[in-house]
Amino acid sequence: MSTTLDLAKQLIALPSITPDDGGCQQLLAHRLTAMGFTVESLPFGPVSNLWAITAGDGPLFVFAGHTDVVPPGPLKQWKFDPFTPTEHDNCLYGRGAADMKSSLAAMITAAERVLTNRTLNGRLAFLITSDEEGEAVDGTRAVMDLLKTRGIKIDYCLVGEPSSSKRLGDTIKIGRRGSLNGKLKLRGVQGHVAYPQLAANPIHQALPALSELSQMQWDAGNASFPPTSFQISNMKAGTGANNVIPEVMEIEFNLRYSTQLDAETIKTRVQDCLDRHGLTENEFSYDIDWQLSGKPFLTATGSLIDVVCESIESVTGNVVERSTAGGTSDGRFIAPMGAELVELGPVNTTIHKVNEHTNIQELENLSEIYQLILERML
């Protein structure tokens, strides 16, 4: 068994449902300490974080990732126990096999090979959290705030998120859209459905505005990002009786937005639309609770992107697509500090699903790719 596969199995065998680390970081810290890293445990709230760095000076290259996983879901639907790593049909099965304990294993073994009898022209660090799949407040975000107070600047960062689509390395992420959530609470006047003149129905009042927001062209996107998207995720109103006009309607929505917009502009446009449709007139009133999950970021050019693409092509022969699609990642907390950032990891077709798995040969290739990146960057 290879060292990478063995380490991936050890990590999967440690149940670490977010925000629980399950002992994964202790295992990784042991390997990093043996390589000469200075290792710190940085707990914030219920979250475990690990920061490890080599001595020296020069540019700082960081491997970033997470040990937490999502719940396994219905156990009866799994071929094998989700926390018993199992080899089957040339694949490694288990929760976290793709997202992203295999990436962590590949990073560690790549670093071990590079650091054997070699001196780096720079510094190497690991930033690992148990809060990526959860609220993402006490994890990478908190560690980055701490590093900022210490004056530590990350020059290059490789995040091990599962970026690949069909084959390892066919896609890398060079940025992500921003994510802005809104909770709209619209108040009217409760009453009997037979006497609508004595009530004010918040549902009727909200629908035209929501329709306009859902059809609005927020921007045209650009060469790296698709147009901004507005999506309603939840709606709640009513007392449960079919003869009562409700007093309150609650709507949750999300905007995934490009670098053509900023959060404040979006908020203004949403509120202008609501006001234009009379949500503050007569008996109606509303308030919105906004939550910014992350600003958009982009590494359009730079030496890291070039090296990542060259390394992938050297190992796999794949032509690499550069993408900003998908959800958010912890890269949103690292890139704004000025780092060139790329996400590269396993195929993502089974992440968060029952029977999550990754191809074992591609796991070995991923470690080799990470090694080439390190050698070429440092």
Image (spheres, rainbow, N blue to C red):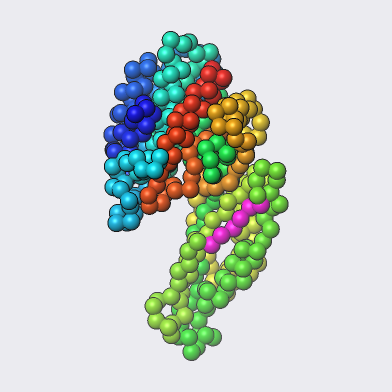
Residue in the picture at 58% in, 46% down? 325
**Front position in the image: 313 or 26:** 313
Quadrant containing the C terminus in the rendered view: top right
Q: How many circles with numbers are drawn on the protein?
A: 0
Q: Is residue 220 above or below residue 176?
A: below
In percent of width and height, residue 217 lies at 69, 58
In percent of width and height, residue 83 lies at 29, 43
**Relative to 65, is 75 on the left or the right?**
left
Residue in the picture at 37% in, 32% down? 5
Quarter of the view holding residue 254: bottom right
Residue 20 seen anywhere in this rendered image of the structure: no
Quadrant containing the N terminus in the rendered view: top left
Range drawn in magenta: 227-232
In percent of width and height, residue 366 lies at 48, 31
Residue at far front of view: 89
In percent of width and height, residue 350 lies at 44, 48
Residue in the picture at 64% in, 57% down? 269
Q: Main secondary structure of the magenta part?
A: strand
Q: Is residue 43 above or below residue 54?
A: below
Residue 55 seen anywhere in this rendered image of the structure: yes
Q: Is residue 185 above or below residue 343?
A: below
**Relative to 301, is 83 on the left or the right?**
left
**Relative to 105, is 298 on the left or the right?**
right
Does 247 appear in magenta?
A: no
Quarter of the view holding residue 104: top left
**Front position in the image: 163 or 252:** 163
Residue in the picture at 48% in, 48% down? 349
**Front position in the image: 116 or 125:** 116
